[in-house]
């Protein structure tokens, strides 16, 4: 068996959910979109179902997967439906839906549900990705109400820059939200993970926690989380070949890397086809036998090379942590100029183990 393994610690997932819920207060949806940020949605939902208030996914297909696995908690479709025909399945599978566009609003007005829908009405508070503009929001709310097709409307918006502590935009989005929805009854949901950490004023009836659940930090300029959160995924592989090179020898594709000293090189089973970012620059590390080892040479599709010169005890068969407990996934993301979310979602071909 190829030794690339993603170990998913569901106890840590539960712990992180409870931490997020304690911080936010009220009710918190666990966001399981993109196959639970690459952690596998069904086992994550099963691990959380006795403590979570509900789940959120991107689309109908993801929700049906959870229902088919026996998940009974509320499930919110964060993007809403893509076509009117999906509304029948929303009803059949008893799902909640975001309404974020005029088209989705018209689909609901034209539908004939046997039981009214649970809707989360999205305000575009200047992230300008989805939702109704402030000038159109209360009319959209009134149309939903007047349609007779909805049972309740949760008022919601999404933040563009909550991951930048000290940035004023989030506060302005909250003020715009509160101003726009004043007088409209119903529950409110504002906070994603970053806002749960950094913006007290965003803690309302419902939080929506994604990346924190998985134990990674959403905050730019903060690679480590406090001990309050625990990494859920540990991605490991093994050294499967070792060679000794003299100084002045190239390694791998291109001329990116030439040894500057006699170097002991370990070959490990993980490459960019597994989702490890090929774009890492300068000094990205893995952890072997409790010590850091630097990745050297360009990443290949299925393998990469690491410098074992200073780790004499490491050799064929040694376990290598690519990210997890000692190497934070956000640290690797920073090396690659991306975010932990992308790395976690992209893990492919690893053997998944759940514990
Ligand atoms: C993905 C998503 C979230 C969760 O975001 P995190 O930063 O992972 O907490 C919350 N709300 C919406 C609308 C989302 O799309």
Image: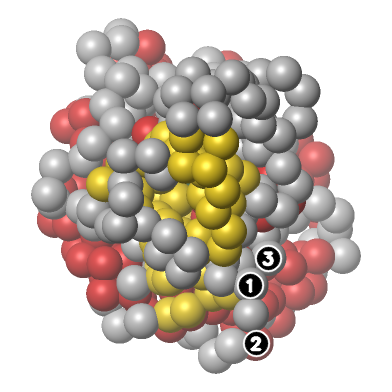
Q: Which residue is at the front of the view, 209 or 156? A: 209
Residue placed furthest toward the top? 168
Question: How many angstroms separate mark 3 from mark 2 (CA)?
Answer: 24 Å
Of mark 3 and mark 1, the one earlier in the sequence is: 1
Quadrant of res 61: bottom right
User: Residue 198's spot in the image, x, y percent?
Assistant: 21, 29
Residue placed furthest toward the front? 246
Q: Which residue is at the front of the view, 270 or 167? A: 270
Q: Nearer the viewer, mark 3 or mark 1?
A: 1
Q: Is residue 318 above or below residue 24?
A: below
Q: Nearer the viewer, mark 1 or mark 2?
A: 1
Can you say which quadrant of the picture contains the N terminus? bottom right
Reading the image, the residue beneath label 2 is 68
The label number, if any, that marks residue 349 in the structure image: 3
Q: Is residue 350 visible?
A: yes
Reading the image, the residue beneath label 1 is 2
Question: How many angstroms separate mark 3 from mark 1 (CA)?
Answer: 9 Å
Question: Residue at coordinates 37% horizontally, 12% vertically from top-left?
Answer: 169
Of mark 1 and mark 2, the one earlier in the sequence is: 1
Q: Is residue 28 visible?
A: no
Query: In the displayed structure, does residue 86 sit left or right of residue 210?
Result: right
User: Residue 29's spot in the image, x, y percent?
Assistant: 38, 59
Question: Residue at coordinates 81% horizontally, 51% vertically from top-left?
Answer: 82
């Amino acid at each position: 068996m190829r030794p690339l393994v993603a170990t998913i610690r569901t106890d840590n997932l539960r712990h992180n959910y409870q931490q997020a819920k304690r911080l936010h207060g009220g009710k918190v949806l666990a966001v399981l979109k993109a196959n639970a940020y690459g952690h596998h949605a069904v086992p994550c939902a099963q691990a959380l179902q006795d403590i979570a208030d509900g789940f959120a996914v991107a689309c109908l297909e993801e929700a049906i997967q959870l229902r088919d696995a026996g998940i009974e908690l509320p499930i919110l479709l964060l993007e809403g439906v893509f076509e009117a025909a999906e509304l029948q399945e929303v009803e059949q599978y008893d799902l909640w839906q975001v309404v974020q566009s005029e088209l989705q609003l018209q689909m609901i007005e034209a539908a004939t549900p046997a039981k009214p829908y649970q809707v989360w009405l999205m305000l575009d508070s200047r992230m300008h990705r989805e939702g109704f503009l402030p000038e159109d929001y209360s009319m959209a709310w009134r149309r939903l109400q007047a349609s007779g097709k909805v049972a309740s409307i949760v008022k919601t918006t999404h933040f563009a820059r909550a991951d930048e502590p000290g940035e004023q935009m989030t506060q302005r989005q909250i003020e715009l939200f509160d101003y726009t929805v004043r007088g409209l009854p119903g529950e409110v949901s504002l906070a994603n993970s970053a806002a749960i950490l950094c913006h007290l004023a965003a803690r309302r009836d419902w939080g929506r926690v994604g990346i924190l659940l998985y134990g990674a930090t959403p905050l730019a300029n903060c690679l480590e989380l406090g001990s309050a959160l625990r990494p859920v995924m540990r991605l490991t592989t093994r050294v499967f070949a070792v060679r000794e090179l003299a100084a002045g020898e190239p390694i791998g594709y291109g001329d990116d890397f030439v040894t500057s000293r006699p170097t002991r090189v370990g070959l490990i089973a993980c490459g960019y086809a597994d989702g490890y970012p090929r774009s890492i620059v300068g000094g990205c590390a893995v952890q072997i036998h409790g010590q850091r080892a630097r990745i050297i040479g360009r990443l290949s599709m299925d393998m990469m090379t690491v410098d074992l010169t200073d780790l004499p005890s490491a050799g064929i068969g040694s376990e290598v942590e690519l990210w997890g407990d000692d190497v934070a996934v956000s640290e690797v993301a920073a090396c690659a100029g991306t975010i932990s979310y992308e790395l976690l979602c992209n893990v492919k071909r690893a053997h998944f183990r759940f514990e």
